[in-house]
Structures are given as C-alpha cells and as structure tokens.
Amino acid sequence: MFTSSMPQLAFKSPPLGLHSPPDSNALKDGSDSELSDLEMDLDPSSNSELHLEPKEIIDGVPVFAPSMEQFQDFEKFITAVNPWGMTHGIVKVIPPKKWLDEQPSLHEEVKKIKIKNPYIQEMNNQGSRGTTGNFRQLNLSSNRTYNIVEWRALCNQLSRQPPAKRGETRRAPEKLVNAAKKKVEFGRPCENSESTVGRMSKPSLGKKSKSKPKEEEVSVNSRRNKYREDDTLVDEKAFKDFDYNLYEEFDDERCQELEVAYWKHISYAPPIYGGDMPGTLFTDKTKVWDLRNLPGFLNYLDEKVPGINTTYLYIGSWKSTFSWHLEDVDLYSINYLHFGAPKQWYSISQGDRERFEKAMAIKWPEEYKDCNQFLRHKTFQISPAALLKEFKIKVNKIVHRPGEFMITFPYGYHAGYNLGYNCAEAVNFAVDEWIPIAEKAKRCDCAQQQDSVWVDLDSLRKKLPRTHKWYLGEPGEEEYFEEDEIDQPTDMPTPPHSGSDIKICQPRKRKHITPKTQIRPPKRRATVKVPEEPDCILCPNAGFEILSTDNGKKAHRICGEYIPETCVVEDVVHDIGFISKARMGLKCINCRSKKGACFQCSAAKCTRAYHATCAAASGVLVQKVWISSYVEDGTEYKEEIFDFRCRFHRPRRDKDIDEVTLSEDCKIKQFGYGLEKGDVCQFQYLRSEIFAGLVISNNRSESSVTINVLFDKTK
C-alpha cells in the first residue's frame, strides 16, 4: 500500500442559478481524489466557442435543449456542457425537433435485432440486521435467442409487466395474430406460472420437456468477447403487423410509482436483460450525433472494441438493471433511447465521489479488500434512500425518455433500471478533456480484469496528427528549431503574476538589422527519429540475462525457455521463426503490452497471457511436468514441458498455516539455500500478495536473501 500527496484544486462554480445537491459542487479540503490533480477550467465561458445554459435542473441533473445550430458540432457541444457534467455526473440532452423529425422509421432495422443469451438478473439482498437497500447482482445467461417480437411477447407476460396504475389491473398479454408468433409461446410457462425465463423449459410441440436450459453465471462485460452479430435470415411472418413502439403513458407520477415498486420488489421475480449486444439502429440518414461515427480519440484505436468505439444495443424489460459503476478508463459515454418505456437514471456528483466509494467499501468490505476497483464489476446496487439515510449522500436522478440522450462524464458514478420493454443504444467516446483524466485512470486488477477494457494512452497519442496538442512523439524523437525562430517576439500578452497585480516584463531581444534587399531563407523544422533497438525481441522488459538468437537478434534466456515454440541450446535461442502470429498478438495481463510473445495459463479455458519476464511478478506458478506425446505411427514418448498456472489457478496456501509453521518448513529452507545470484524467485507475504525479485545475494549463514523487487509498484 502506498500513498501520494496531491495538490488541491479550487473549482470554479458553474453560472449562477445552478441548484446542485449538497456537497456536490466542490471537493472538501484535504481530498485525495484524482480530480484534484486535474488542471481543468470548469468555467463554461472559457475555452469554448459555444456557451450553453441548461434548460432546467431536475433533481440535480442538468437538462439541455439545444437549437439545431448548437447541436451541429458534437465536440463543441460536449466542451460547452463539460463543466456541468463534471459537476453532476450526468446530463440529459433533448435533441432539436428538426433532428428528431429527420430520423427514419425503424420498422426494417428492428428486424435485424437478435437478443442472444440475455441474462437473468438475480438481485440478492445484502442487508443485515433489518437493513435494506443493498443488493448484489448475479447475472445468469439464459442460453436463448429472441427477436424483438418474441422479446416483446416475453415482456407482456403478467410476471414481467410493471405494476398496474392505482385502481387498475394488469393488462392481459396480447393475443398473437399469426402462427409464427404462436410458435414463440410453445413451451413457455402459463400466465400464472411462478417460474421465470431463466428456468423455462425448452420449446416443444405439446410434449413435456425433460431438461432445462443451462444457466451460466456471467459478468456484465464478458459478453464483449463472446457475442457476435447474428446475420440469420429474418422471419417476415413474425413481423407482419408488428409495431415496435410502445403506446403507454409514463408521466412523472407514474414513474415515481414505479420507482417505489422497483426498490420494494427488486429481489423478487428476476428480470431479464438483453444488454451489451453489438449492433446499431442508426442509419446513414442520421448526419449528426450518429453514435456509430462520433468524433474523438477512440477513432485512433487499432481495433474495433464493442461498446467502446462501436455501439451496443440494450434491450430492456421491467426492472432490468445497470448497477453502480464508472466507465472503463474513465471514458465519457452516451446513451440514446430509441423506443419503448423510459429508463430511470441515478448519478453521484463528482464532489461526492470519494465519500460514495468509502460508503460502498463499508457496505462490501470483503469485495473492496479483494479489489479496490470492485465497483467496476457493475454488480453492486444501493438505493438512493439508503445512501442519504446512512451516509448523507444525495443522489441525482432523472427519467430518460425515448428520443433523448443521456451523457455520462468521467468520475460520475451512475446506475439505473428500465421501466419496461425498450431499446437503447450506447457507446463510449473521448474528447480533449479526457486525456489528463485517462493519465490517472485506475483499472480492475482482480479475476474480472479480463472483462474490462483498457486503452494504451501513449500508443493512442502517437497516432494523433502532429499538430494536435496531445500528440506524443516516438521515443527518441526530438525537434530542432532555428535560433532566430525561438527569438521571434510574440503578440501574446504576458500573464500576471499569480496572486498579485505585478506584471513581469519579458527581456527584450536585440533586433537583427537586415538589409531590405536581402532575402531571408525560410525557416524549417527538422524532425529526427532515433531508432531504439529493444533488449529482447520477445518482451518489452529489461534487466534479465540476454542471449543471441538464431535470426541475429537478442532475447532473454527466460523468454526462450518459456515460449513453447522456442528453445535454448548452447546459450542461443532457437526457432524464433516458428512463433505463430496469434501468439505474437497476445496482450500481457501484467504490462498490457502486445510487444513480443506471450504464453497462456495452462488451466482449461483460461486465456490469461503473460510475457516470460512478467510472469513471476504476476504470481504465475511455473513448474516442469512430464506429458505423453505421440508420433504419427502411434509411438508414445515422454516430454518435459513447462506448466503455467496464473495466480487464480495456482494451488492455494492453507489459510490456517501460521508464521511459525512456515519458518520450520524444511522444503522452504532447502529452496532458500539453493538460490543463486541472478535467480528470479517469487515471494509471498503471509496471507497477502505474491511478488517477485531478482536475487542479489544469498547469506545462508543468516538464512536471508537480498533481492531487487521486479516491477515494484510502490515506487
């Protein structure tokens, strides 16, 4: 554990008339939030050609209703509303009527929606001693695929409808008109059945099903790597006379009724949610604010990452939930509701972020101990009433209706749920204001880190145009200017001295007297790139024993031994050319780099990859084992290979073992005595983390070893 001191930032308040929740507009003295390190100007009148005021502020959420002219430039609009979003966490944008009228009908687009493997959300009450309002979300994959017609029929079942209005009863499910729709209902539970979709029988034609679809626990983000768009043919009969719109009134009173019902019945009748599905309902007819083509830094990524720089569809039902979380890499996000019932949104103002994180850590101490970024798992839900009562934290909230945008901002925790059948589309984006935030972004380092997304900021900045203010040159790249160019006077005014009205005079430059007839040569800027040869062609790290390779390069001995395709013979690394392209493209879990080659965990279905030099520091257990191999004629022979087990699949030490038992263990002593200078060895604090070091000396008489810790994170 380490601490760092951070300078304090005095926030400039948004314009007068802002009615924010208590403790939401400024950081408290002594805050250690990353916000205090960001030198951002939160005055909306500066650094922006566009000046916007919110139409109104509803329960702490600014609502903007721009004109078509203000709406045209997405980046300028985000810059103008950024001071409000960085104060309240989220903002709502009501597009101009002209833009809404230009949007085409979606009757053909909805036919392409395939809701594959939606997850049933079990909300388990985590309250103790009579307390309520704390829930942990468990996602179970239903292993089913629906089209939008089937999904709406599912949402119309009595068990999945929201409560009826006061004095009314729930409406009966609509009768299906054609045979294609009736087929959807075969094998489904009757209206009065207590079972949910997650436990439904498989479809059958009048016969009782003996088996149930297998439910698999999944994380919210893991669907990014599993889901692929389904291009199967459309069943036109199923869409005959189908209208995707929902003609039901959701006024403010109705939404408040459903909010009370949501928190009262959240742990009953688990909802089903078709979330994180790559796809879009936008077409080329949308010229501005097309979520498929938003401007920003994410367009410079090397690959398409679903949900990050390509859009996701979210098909909701009553009570389907997105729990408290921040976006990966603290990105911005935008959500557009195409049709259906509204969404209820909650947000935490950035000024309350630190107190909110501490409150959640108090509610879930074990989860916080295992991963201090556990809220990025998107599985922890707490009610606004509980936050206000127990921690005095005011939650901002607003209803998101069809045809409206919701924009989330960095450091603004947000959560919410759907009030019924609907369809939304979302994507992340990044603008200039995001770069200093990304430099301080934190990520999840626990078992669920493979579900999260990370952006290599340096690599991204290198791809920017050279004229961009955030452009980052290649290592060794330097710029040279002529001396005369540096000495040229500027028309920029001299800034006043901080804290005083005294002006600091610039030293005058001696003027160069040049005859008028003399033509001065044009000034040019020269860029010189200094190539850097890596120490090892198989990894980006240094400090390990280097050997020559059979292709004339250099590689670490440990890399040559651990990579399956290579071997070390007579202090030369052989068979570099046999390394597959797929292996060269793996990203290391520890250093997040694709440079070189990685091996993967030997456990079944585990895809975690590591550089050989990163393995020890990542807690990977490396052992030599004998396996049976066979040649073409069936002859069996034994082969010794390396077996790799990541820190999540390596054998666990018994928690009951104490310090005395370990100090008297003969195997540990024997291993320690055998260590030589230059060996890489793993160490573990008692009941704590694993780390690695390079042996500097071994004092066997005192039973002590001096090491140089590898990749020391405390520095």
Image (cartoon, grey):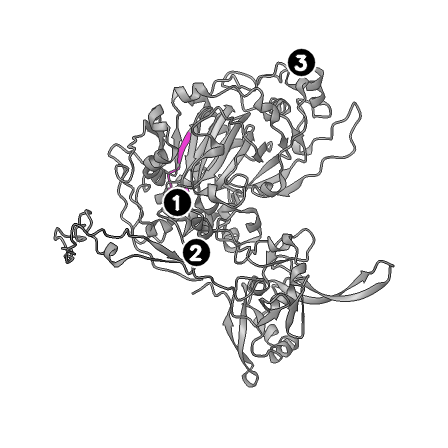
Figure check: 391 above or below 252? below
- Mark 2 surroundings: few (<14), some (14-19) or many (≥20) residues within 10 A: some
Figure check: 66 above or below 2? above
Is disc 2 in contact with disc 1, using a CB cutoff of under 8 Å?
no
Does 395 appear in magenta? yes
Comparing labels 3 and 2, the label whose residue is closer to the camera: 2
Comparing labels 2 and 1, the label whose residue is closer to the camera: 2
Residue 97: give x, y in percent of width and height: 39, 20
Residue with the mark numbered 3: 177
Give the residues drawn in magenta, as a range.
390-398
Residue at 54% across, 19% down: 245
Please name whichever residue, 183 or 170, is drawn nearer the observer in this view of the structure. Answer: 183
Q: Can residue 83 be seen by looking at this rendering?
A: yes
Residue 138: give x, y in percent of width and height: 59, 41
Residue with the mark numbered 1: 434
Q: Amino acid at mark 3?
A: Val
Residue with the mark numbered 2: 474
Please name whichever residue, 193 or 20, is drawn nearer the observer in this view of the structure. Answer: 20
Q: Amino acid at mark 1?
A: Trp
